[in-house]
Image (tube, helix red, strand yellow):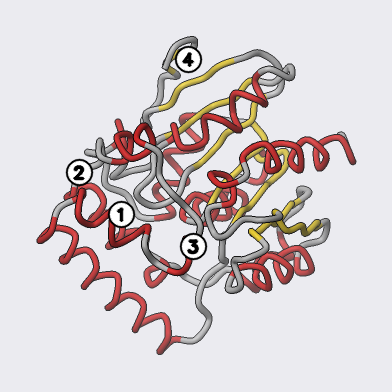
């Protein structure tokens, strides 16, 4: 990645630009590079953009950590910033904001959930994630990506050759560990703790992401200072399908109430 500099820390990270820091945290099977179109736009507008590879992914592929430990590692790597998290990355950023509120200036969530409240549903999801992890190990990353992106959740998403090649840098062992340690079934639900978030929170979801639109609305309504928006003509992976729209909405959120 030309013009991106390595940022030292326990998680692999790269940085570009100067100014207030904004950290981008990716979803499952992705890497920090998945955020590059949005992050490069941000870096061109007087901000420092940081791309992070989560445990089990990309250049952090050999790191093993659950959600709370991942939040620790993220805090140590990137420090005070605006944090932008998608799906898995959003759940990591929620943990970070609750554990280290003093370093999260603002929080942007896309397609993220505070967790599954019902014990039986959460247990079933944990078992499902375990089966998925084993299946991933059995079939390998290449075949798994075809299956993963073919889900109705990602309707309309087509990986270009560069994005697919980037995801193929991930290993089956790394992704399986992420499912087992950071899957939604492992997550203690955080809904009741959202009221503790003392920073502005912007919750987004693609307009066609029928599962996560109401979750994003509820998040925005549950925090002391919340904003909700849909990303037009996008599904779950809104930042991949509509990167400039996502970048523009984030810029609007930041401009609406500078601290």
Which tag is nearer the camera, tag 2 or tag 3? Answer: 3
Q: Are marks 4 and 1 in contact (CB under 8 Å)?
A: no
Mark 2 vs 4, N-terminal side: 4
Disc 2/disc 4 C-alpha distance (Å): 23 Å
Locate residue 104, reporting x and y percent.
66, 40
Q: How many dots with numbers?
A: 4
Q: What residue does disc 4 label?
A: 4
Q: How far apart are labels 4 and 3 at the CA level? A: 31 Å
Image quarter of residue 180: bottom left
- Circles 4 and 3, Cβ within 8 Å, touching? The answer is no
Task: Give the mark nearest the N terminus, 4 or 3.
Answer: 4
Q: At 38% from the left edge and 72% from the top edge, which residue is drawn?
A: 185
Query: SS of the residue at dot 1?
Result: helix
Q: Earlier in the sequence, mark 4 or mark 1?
A: 4
Residue at x 41% of width, y 17% of height: 1
For label 3, the SS is loop
Provide the residue designation for mark 3: 155
In terms of sequence position, does the residue under pointer 2 or pointer 3 come before the other?
A: 3
Secondary structure at numbered mark 4: loop
Which residue is disc 2 drawn over?
A: 171
- Circles 3 and 1, Cβ within 8 Å, touching? The answer is no
Residue 82: x and y, percent?
67, 36
Rendered residue at 81%/42% (across/down): 253
Q: In the rendered image, which residue does mark 1 sit on?
A: 178
Asked whether the viewer can see residue 175, the reply is yes
Q: Is residue 211 above or below residue 109?
A: below
| CA distance separating discs 1 and 2 | 11 Å
10 Å crowding of disc 2: few (<14), some (14-19), many (20+): many
For image coordinates 23% across by 57% down, the residue present is 144
Give the position of the C terminus as an image quadrant: top right
């Amino acid at each position: 990645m030309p013009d991106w500099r390595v940022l030292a820390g326990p998680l692999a990270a790269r940085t570009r630009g100067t100014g207030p820091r904004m950290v981008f945290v990716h979803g499952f099977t992705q890497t920090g590079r998945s955020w590059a179109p949005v992050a490069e736009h941000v870096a061109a507008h007087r901000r420092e953009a940081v791309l992070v590879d989560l445990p089990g992914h990309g250049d952090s592929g050999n790191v093993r950590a659950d959600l709370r430990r991942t939040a620790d590692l993220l805090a140590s790597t990137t420090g005070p910033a605006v944090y932008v998290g998608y799906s898995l990355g959003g759940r990591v950023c929620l943990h970070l904001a609750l554990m280290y509120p003093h370093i999260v200036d603002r929080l942007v969530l896309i397609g993220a959930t505070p967790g599954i409240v019902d014990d039986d549903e959460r247990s079933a999801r944990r078992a499902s994630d375990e089966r998925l992890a084993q299946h991933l190990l059995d079939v390998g990353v290449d075949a798994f990506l075809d299956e993963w992106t073919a889900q109705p959740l990602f309707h309309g998403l087509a990986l270009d050759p560069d994005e697919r090649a980037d995801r193929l840098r991930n290993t089956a062992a790394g992704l399986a560990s992420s499912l087992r340690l950071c899957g939604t079934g492992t997550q203690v639900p955080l809904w009741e703790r959202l009221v503790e978030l003392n920073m502005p929170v912007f919750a987004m979801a693609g307009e066609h992401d029928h599962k996560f639109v109401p979750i994003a609305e509820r998040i925005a309504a549950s925090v002391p200072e919340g904003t909700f928006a849909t990303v037009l003509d996008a599904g779950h992976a809104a930042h991949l399908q509509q990167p400039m729209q996502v970048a523009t909405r984030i810029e609007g959120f930041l401009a609406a109430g500078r601290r």
